[in-house]
């Protein structure tokens, strides 16, 4: 149990507090009264930090408190559990967040911490409204997905466009079936760019446009070169040969006649003719002998050899003549140009060979009529160029035939080459887009799942799960609605506020079946106090062994509610080991006094008040016995009258700090008694018969100076206070002298 507060230093208004030795020790129930701002809440904060022994708000705090086990001082934890309800508890244990446009009320300090974590996480997800550049992870993810979609659309468009180009380039071969997905699949197999030049591209395009053509036979003259050389060699030999014979000059001079005659001899001999078939005259024997001498066997043999060679020459001629290149139209379009070139080279060479053959044969004919003379061969049959040209033609024909043989393969190759070429045209662009897509996907994965290398940068999924877990904790750790509603009804005396569990965690609060969007300060205090009383039964706190400190649980509540709140409070703390109750409300004070002053409670209770004084213009607080007037009378009117009656100024503004408020309340009490109607203060004051000038001064003083604006007081307040307190007391005495005397007597002071 706490017995005394021996010393407090550097605790707000309790800056230099020293124990008054005449002050009675604390008992089990301790009632402490004080006006707003006098230091009650500050004193309650001292109790709140006893368990830890230190304060972050007041780091230089010093205190010395006597307990039943000895003294405790700052930085030393008290071994008893202390639960404190005050303004700090209210602000720490109730909060409002908005979900689905409805306010959600969070009750409990731990839950508030969870809400703070949720808000922090939601800022990470949704951005900080106070920081325009902070768009949040979800918005960033949306933008990344839009960027990814745009990049994928750009990539898709590349493949859609290139698919059309490939269809066009293949002249419709793939046009009906080649689509974007075909281009994507082909591109995935393309490891490097494979562009082709325009000439090759044109050839491939022609291949795809062509229909299959027939096989063309190659041109062939077997051993033409060898044959030509043999003929030339044989011709040279024949021309050099000579035949001895009787010369018939006329035949010698006329080869045609000689040939005709020679043929006639052959026919006469063949048919055993004795007459000339031309003149039908007998052939003279002598003439036959002369002719036979001229046309002898050697001559015949030579001529037979000439005939034989001419047959070979004619055969060679016919063979060469028959060698003819097919029309270029029989070849594939892309081969026709080269083919025409080699054919144009071949034809003149063929003509030259034929001329040479004819020339050689002509020289043999001359030999026929000049068998007795050796001749030189001037003609030659050269076939090297001809054979080479023929080979060039056959090479082009083989290209054609190869293409025909491999026509399907050629088209497939052309298709693949053109496809790869077209895909190579977009290679760099697509690779850049793919790199962007990979990067953006990685950023999306990190936004969604976090960066494994940076645990301090969690992903959206983890944060969303964490938010939901925290909301679940709020829901599951929160006090059941039924208990809150029952206790709140008991505290307020009416079922006006109803709690309902919110799916997001926390509670909806309804007032008369409608969502309560704004709670008054009194309602917040009531709700938090109910929560406080519920948690006095927590496992970590034994009310029969712990200390309970309650500061103004009825703050801002109406007078009707105070009776229910008093009954609720009385029931809540009746089993406590030690209780400290602070209040500024006189009506509530009267209820508490009525409970604690009588019967067995009287021996267990003590009564105090917190007063202020001024030390070198510094307002300080001290703990005193509760004034007997407050303790004994049913109204604070006597006490306030006493404050004015004994008031003396030391000439400082600080000494008159509280007086205007006291004067206003005394005036209101007096006027309520003298003019018992619903008029305002000014109208009631007008009804009082007293010096008009002084009445005006009293009204102005109590109305204007009692509402502190935070701008400070004018130095004229000191003499004004002295004058107007005097005027007010004069007015009470003048208007109701008997009443004035009773008041003075009640405070134990003489009017004389």
Image (cartoon, rainbow, N blue to C red):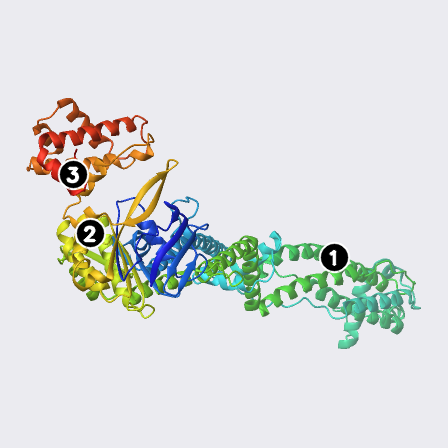
Badge number at residue 349: 1
Marks 2 and 3 close (CB-CB < 8 Å): no
Dot 2 or dot 3: first in sequence order is 2
Q: Secondary structure at mark 3?
A: helix
Q: Residue 365's spot in the image, x, y percent?
A: 82, 62
Residue to which mark 3 is pinned: 744
- Residue 517 can be seen, yes or no: no
Residue nearest the observer in this picture, 503 or 329? 503
Question: From the viewer's perspective, is 73 left or right of 275?
Answer: left
The answer for how far apart the CA atoms under marks 2 and 1 are is 139 Å
Residue to which mark 2 is pinned: 589
Q: Residue at x 22, y 63 (%)?
A: 572
Q: Secondary structure at mark 1?
A: helix
Total number of numbered discs in the rendering: 3
The answer for how far apart the CA atoms under marks 2 and 3 are is 23 Å
Dot 2 or dot 1: first in sequence order is 1
Q: Secondary structure at mark 2?
A: helix
Badge number at residue 332: none
Could you tell me which quadrant the C terminus lies in?
top left
Marks 1 and 3 close (CB-CB < 8 Å): no
Please identify, in this view, whether the residue under mark 2 or under mark 3 is nearer the observer.
3
Could you tell me which quadrant the N terminus lies in?
bottom left
């Amino acid at each position: 149990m706490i017995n005394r507060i021996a010393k407090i230093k550097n605790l707000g208004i309790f800056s230099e507090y020293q124990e008054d030795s005449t002050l009675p020790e604390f008992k089990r129930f301790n009632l402490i009264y004080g006006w707003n701002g006098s230091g009650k809440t500050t004193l309650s904060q001292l109790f709140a930090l006893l368990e830890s022994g230190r304060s972050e708000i007041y780091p230089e705090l010093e205190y010395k408190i006597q307990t039943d086990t000895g003294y405790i001082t700052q930085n030393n934890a008290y071994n008893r559990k202390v639960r404190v309800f005050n303004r700090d508890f209210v602000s720490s244990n109730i909060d409002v967040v908005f979900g689905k446009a409805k306010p959600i009320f969070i009750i409990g300090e731990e839950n508030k911490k969870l809400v703070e974590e949720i808000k922090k996480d939601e800022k990470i997800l949704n951005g900080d409204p106070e920081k325009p550049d902070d768009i949040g992870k979800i918005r960033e993810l949306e933008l990344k997905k839009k960027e990814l979609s745009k990049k994928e659309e750009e990539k898709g468009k590349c493949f859609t466009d290139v698919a059309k180009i490939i269809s066009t380039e293949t002249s419709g071969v793939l046009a009906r079936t080649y689509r974007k997905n075909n281009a994507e699949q082909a591109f995935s197999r393309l490891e490097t760019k494979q562009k082709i030049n325009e000439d090759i591209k044109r050839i491939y395009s022609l291949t795809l446009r062509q229909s299959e053509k027939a096989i063309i036979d190659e041109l062939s003259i077997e051993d033409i070169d060898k044959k030509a050389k043999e003929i030339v060699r044989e011709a040279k030999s024949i021309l050099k040969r000579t035949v001895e014979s009787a010369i018939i000059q006329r035949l010698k001079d006329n080869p045609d006649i000689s040939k005709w005659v020679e043929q006639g001899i052959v026919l006469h001999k063949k048919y055993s003719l004795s007459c000339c078939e031309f003149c039908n005259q007998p052939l003279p024997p002598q003439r036959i002998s002369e002719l036979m001498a001229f046309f002898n066997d050697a001559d015949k043999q030579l001529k037979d050899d000439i005939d034989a060679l001419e047959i070979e020459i004619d055969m060679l001629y016919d063979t060469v003549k028959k060698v003819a290149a097919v029309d270029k139209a029989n070849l594939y379009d892309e081969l026709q140009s080269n083919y025409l070139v080699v054919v144009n080279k071949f034809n003149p060479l063929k003509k030259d060979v034929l001329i040479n053959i004819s020339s050689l044969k002509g020289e043999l004919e001359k030999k026929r009529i000049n068998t007795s003379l050796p001749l030189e061969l001037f003609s030659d049959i050269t076939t090297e160029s001809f054979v080479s040209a023929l080979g060039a033609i056959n090479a082009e024909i083989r290209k054609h035939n190869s293409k025909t043989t491999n026509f399907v393969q050629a088209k497939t190759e052309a298709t693949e080459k053109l496809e790869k070429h077209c895909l190579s045209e977009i290679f760099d662009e697509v690779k850049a887009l793919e790199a962007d897509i990979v990067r953006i996907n990685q950023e999306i994965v990190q936004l969604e799942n976090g960066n494994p290398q940076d645990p301090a940068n969690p992903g959206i999924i983890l944060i969303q799960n964490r938010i939901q877990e925290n909301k679940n904790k709020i829901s599951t750790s929160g006090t059941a609605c039924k208990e809150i509603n029952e206790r709140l009804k008991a505290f307020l005396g009416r079922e006006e506020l109803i709690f309902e569990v919110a799916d997001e965690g926390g509670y909806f609060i309804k007032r008369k079946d409608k969502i309560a969007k704004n709670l008054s300060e009194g309602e917040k205090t009531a709700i938090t106090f109910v929560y406080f009383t519920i948690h006095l039964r927590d496992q970590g706190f034994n009310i029969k062994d712990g200390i309970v400190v309650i500061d103004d649980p009825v703050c801002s509540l109406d007078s009707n509610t105070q009776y229910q709140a008093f009954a609720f409070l009385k029931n809540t703390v009746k089993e406590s080991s030690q209780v400290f109750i602070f209040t500024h409300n006189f009506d509530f004070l009267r209820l508490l006094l009525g409970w604690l002053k009588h019967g067995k409670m009287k021996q267990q209770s003590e009564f105090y008040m917190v007063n202020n004084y001024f030390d070198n213009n510094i307002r300080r607080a001290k703990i005193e016995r509760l004034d007997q007037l407050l303790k004994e009378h049913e109204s604070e009117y006597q006490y306030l009258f006493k404050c004015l009656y004994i008031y003396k100024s030391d000439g400082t503004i600080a000494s008159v700090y509280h007086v205007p408020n006291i004067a206003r309340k005394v005036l209101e009490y007096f006027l309520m008694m003298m003019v018992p109607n619903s008029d305002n203060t000014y109208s009631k004051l007008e009804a009082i018969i007293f010096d008009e000038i002084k009445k005006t001064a009293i009204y102005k003083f109590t109305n204007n100076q009692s509402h502190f604006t935070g701008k400070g007081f004018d130095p004229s307040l000191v003499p004004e206070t002295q004058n107007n307190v005097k005027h007010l007391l004069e007015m009470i005495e003048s208007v109701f002298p008997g009443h004035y005397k009773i008041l003075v007597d009640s405070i134990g002071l003489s009017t004389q």
